Image (tube, grey):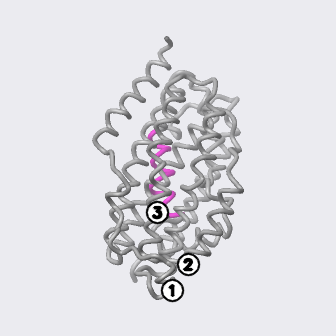
Amino acid sequence: MSALQEKLDALYQRHLDLTRNLDWGYHQLLPWERGKNFVDHPWSAEQGNLSPELTLAVETAMLTEVNLPWFTSGLTRIFENSPSALKRFVHTWTREEDQHGRVLDVYLLLSRNGDPDARDQVRKQVIERGWQPELRDPFAVMVYTSLQELATRVFYLNFARQVAAADGVLAQILRALAKDETLHYAFYRDAVKAYVEDDPGRMATVCQVIPTFVMPGYGMPGFSHRLRIIAQHGGYGIQAYYDQVLSIVLEAWGVLQHDMSSGTQDARHALDCYIRRIRRVANRQAVKVSPV
């Protein structure tokens, strides 16, 4: 067995050990006492306890999570010829992620936040459309999933703080989801590090993938509008992405300190330009929200 395979096996076992202490059931978190059937008690907009903007943020998270079957099938194909630890992790990840879409969907129904009929139509549309990975190289996908899992974690934690006053139950749900995402990020982050240690030339791929990153929900209706609402009301925008996601992975992988060979200088230059552009936008946002 290669040193890389041994590291991946150890990372997978670490994940299993950690998740034993974090296991949760979505049925334990939901406010079942709020539930009413929609036949005898038709929905109306004033019944919810969240603002339309916060409701849209929850819905956006749900619509991303319900595409799990497509994410699983895509990752399974990509990692088909990869070390067994990566293939096993996809199965474990699917088991853990399975609750995420369900808990958010049922929460919205029980709390009567948002039009259930309209949301049902969008949900069906999103699932029917599906998701296809744009990246095919397993290592490139691990770089992407590291960013995606960390971004999701940060969103859930920031959003939990935003909604805590309006609905403590929702905040608790979001924190539970964030715990899962924390461990998923840790696995992929350290898997990427192991691959780079095995072949430092792979850092070029890291530099290429980061500037193309976009969350996997980009195909849902009104995605750009949803992102703007989340940035304004959900606590997660460009500034949070730069400070709490991009900067974190760059440091974790030592990207900016890595000695890039002449063959990878173009990828590093493109990454540097991307970082400067994101930093400028993040700084402008920080100025806008600073107290006078």
Real-space Cα separation, disc 1 to disc 2, in angstroms = 7 Å
Query: In terms of sequence position, does the residue under pointer 1 or pointer 3 come before the other?
Result: 1
Q: Which mark is residue 115?
A: 2
Q: Could you tell me the amino acid type at mark 2?
A: Asp
Q: Residues within 10 Å of mark 1 (few under 14, many from 20)?
A: few
Picture disc at residue 78: none
Task: Answer whether labels 2 and 3 touch (C-beta < 8 Å).
Answer: no
On the image, the x and y values in percent for residue 46 come to 46, 88
Residue 61 position (above or below residue 48): above
Callout 1: helix, strand or loop? helix
Q: Which secondary structure is most common in the magenta stretch?
A: helix
Can residue 258 be seen here? The reply is yes
Q: Which residue is mark 3?
A: 104
Query: What range of the chain is rendered magenta?
Result: 238-253
Q: Residues within 10 Å of mark 3 (few under 14, many from 20)?
A: many
Indicate the amino acid at tag 1.
Ala
Q: Between disc 1 and disc 2, whose residue precedes?
A: 1
Residue 46 is a magenta residue: no
Which residue: 46% across, 63% down?
104
Name the residue tied to disc 1: 45
Residue 190 location, x and y as percent?
45, 33
Query: Mark 3 or mark 2, which is nearer the start of the sequence?
Result: 3
Quarter of the image that includes the C terminus: bottom left
Q: Are marks 1 and 2 in contact (CB under 8 Å)?
A: yes
Q: Is residue 251 magenta?
A: yes
Q: How many marks?
A: 3
Indicate whether 21 appears above or below 278.
above
Measured Cα–Cα span from mark 1 to mark 3: 18 Å
| In front of the other: 227 or 95 | 95
From the top left corner, tell me how far across and down residue 68 is, in percent: 57, 49
